[in-house]
Image (cartoon, rainbow, N blue to C red):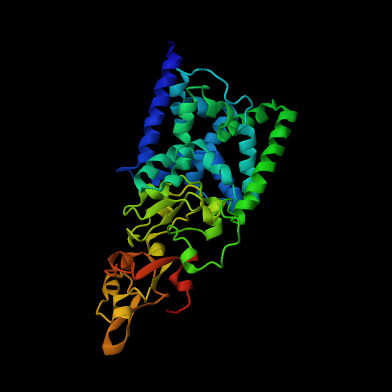
Amino acid sequence: MSGRRWLRIVVRAGCLVIAAVLAAGGPLPALTARAVPGLSPLVVVAAAVTGRAWYPALFWGIPALAVLGLAVWRGRFFCRWLCPSGTVYSLSARWSLRRRLLKVPLNGVLFWSILGGALAGVPVLLCLDPLVSFNRIPALWRAGADAAAWVPGLLLPLFLVLGAVQPLLWCTHLCPLGYGFDFVHRLRRRRLEPDRTRREVVAGLALGVPMAVLAARTVSWLAPRARPQQTPADLPILPPGAVPVTAFAALCVRCYACVHVCPTGVIHVRSRPDRGLARWFRPELDTRTAICEPECNLCSRACPSGALRSLTMAAKSRRQIGVARVRQDACLAWARGQWCMVCADACPYAAIAADYGPGDVPRPRVQRNLCRGCGRCQNECPALLDGQAIVVDGVPEQRGLRDLASDSV
């Protein structure tokens, strides 16, 4: 075995180990959770096009641009030497049956469909980026996601298995990132095949734009009938720093960096087919079992795509991500006249006031202009016979409390 081949094996193994450590988290700083998906120029460019703004700060934009520059110079060098997903897929290639499951490469179609979807506002297939796929598995394992949410998480092991039939099936025939590297390299060297490129662009736009339009309108394939008018309980509780609900569905690449840096485990991955295509496999807060820690802004700093805007601790402390709501029919004080203000005692923001009823029994009342939606009241509520008496609903758009009207319910 030549020295160059040994060097390549060592470099690829080292990059795989480093990427695995970054994806798994552990004692590393939270910012490292975004490092692997943040290396992808496809993620950075598609997110910028979708949001109509250059999101990444200079520090985080430089690595992706450096990888893109490497591709302009050396083509698929990143794929052959550095990509952790490519290294995983190569493990089964050595013992492959060398059959042809897919004869026609589709990576160009996928690449242009992602960019077409980004131009139309929702790059639905951006979740196929190999660096994003690599990053999501540890987070899904940690989050205890529902079975359907594992669908994007199984992308990596699926093509590892398929690689035992057709070697490097993903890398050679499907990877949109690898196609992008090859495209910019050929473009620099003026070696593009015009007819083939034209077909790939047209086919990709024909796939990506309609999917974007479908996703933007939140049309569900499994529940095509018109839904009743949306209620507050239908709104998801998104992680702190989230852009508005519709934009979040478009910008989130499902890398789940926010999930694995969350210290309380309140961020989960859920799949709700009745919520529409753009909202599948999206990270949301589940305040029934955990709280959003008031003194924590890790998730907002870990997002590589701009779906979560980075928040300072001061901004996080004033961010309203949801609003608590008292279910009076289940509340011990409202329904039974019993003394119980556990939710008010637990609230770190003094957002629950007393509304006195018969016999001067205090009954909880949420002050919307003070509630941040952290979920502590819901977790502490002792009323369980008729379900939790206080729950947290999402808001259409997260705002700082200074922007809210002084109203209460």
Specify the farthest residue to the left: 339
Q: Is residue 313 left or right of residue 193?
A: left
Residue 111, by quadrant, is top right
Q: Is residue 53 visible?
A: no
Q: Residue at x 65, y 50 (%)?
A: 120
Q: Nearer the viewer, residue 13 or 74?
A: 13
Q: Residue at x 55, y 56 (%)?
A: 247
Specify the farthest residue to the top: 1
Q: Where 204 sits versus 1, above or below?
A: below
Q: Where 139 sits versus 179, above or below?
A: below
Residue 380: x %, y % from top left: 28, 66
Residue 381, by quadrant, is bottom left
Residue 130: x %, y % from top left: 50, 36
Q: Nearer the viewer, residue 366 or 148?
A: 148
Q: Is residue 21 visible?
A: yes
Q: In which quadrant of the rendered image does the C terminus lie?
A: bottom left
Q: In which quadrant of the rendered image does the N terminus lie?
A: top left
Residue 327: x %, y % from top left: 38, 73
